[in-house]
Image (cartoon, rainbow, N blue to C red):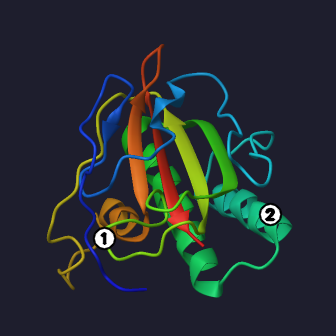
Amino acid sequence: MPHRRFTVHLPPTTAGDALPGLRRSPHAARGAGGAVGTDGDRSATCTGTPVRTPAQARRVVSDVLCAEGAVSPAGRRNALLVASELVTNAVRHAGGVVGFAVGVETAPVGAAAGGTDGRPGGGTCVRIDVEDAVGSRPRTDPTALRDPYRLSGRGWALVQLLAATGDVLPLPGGGKRVSVTVPL
């Protein structure tokens, strides 16, 4: 996978803030709170299995990708890594996961899995949503991936590197939903 930086193409709105280094998802207008819908999804969004650990998140994502069928090995690895990092961040920095959803969808040309950043448009991607009870935005150190001696703190930088789009949406009762799409 080529190493490309993403830029925010749409300004933040009241529906949520685009993540630093990622483009706003076309699904950001879904609003905050409640169950994550399946609008545009090719396979059902999986919300029935409680996810509290990175291992559980990887299992759910793996099950959804297996149901989808042909997924590239690189796309599968990237989706599993992103899910694991998002859940790890919720556990380490936000008191744990309060909501988790994953679904496979086809991105419109020029959105989600493609656009002006050199990625092909209109591809299949996996959407991963992780909710926690803390409303603070994720933070990253721009040097996180370049420091070979760093023991931790690379997770958010990896998510930004591998995800095509992302949003941080505030939840009505407090907390946030981090929603990203990963090209398959």
Could you say which disc has been placed on residue 117 in the image? 1
Q: CA distance from mark 1 to mark 2?
A: 30 Å
What's the amino acid at mark 1?
Answer: Asp
Q: Position of residue 75 (x, y in %)?
A: 59, 77
Mark 1, mark 2: which one is toward the viewer? 1
Tell whether 80 sits left or right of 14: right
Name the N-terminal-most of marks 1 and 2: 2
Tell whether 7 sits left or right of 121: left
Q: Position of residue 32 (x, y in %)?
A: 50, 24
The residue under label 2 is: 63
Query: In percent of the image, x 28 and y 43: which residue is there?
Result: 10
Could you say which disc has been placed on residue 98 in the image? none
Few, some or many residues within 10 Å of mark 2 (<14, 14–19, 20+): few
Q: Secondary structure at mark 1?
A: loop
In the image, 50 versus 79, the foreground residue is 79
Which picture quadrant has residue 116? bottom left
What's the amino acid at mark 2?
Answer: Asp
Q: Secondary structure at mark 2?
A: helix
Few, some or many residues within 10 Å of mark 1 (<14, 14–19, 20+): some
Q: Using the image, determine if residue 169 lies above or below residue 66.
A: above
For the C terminus, give its image quadrant: bottom right
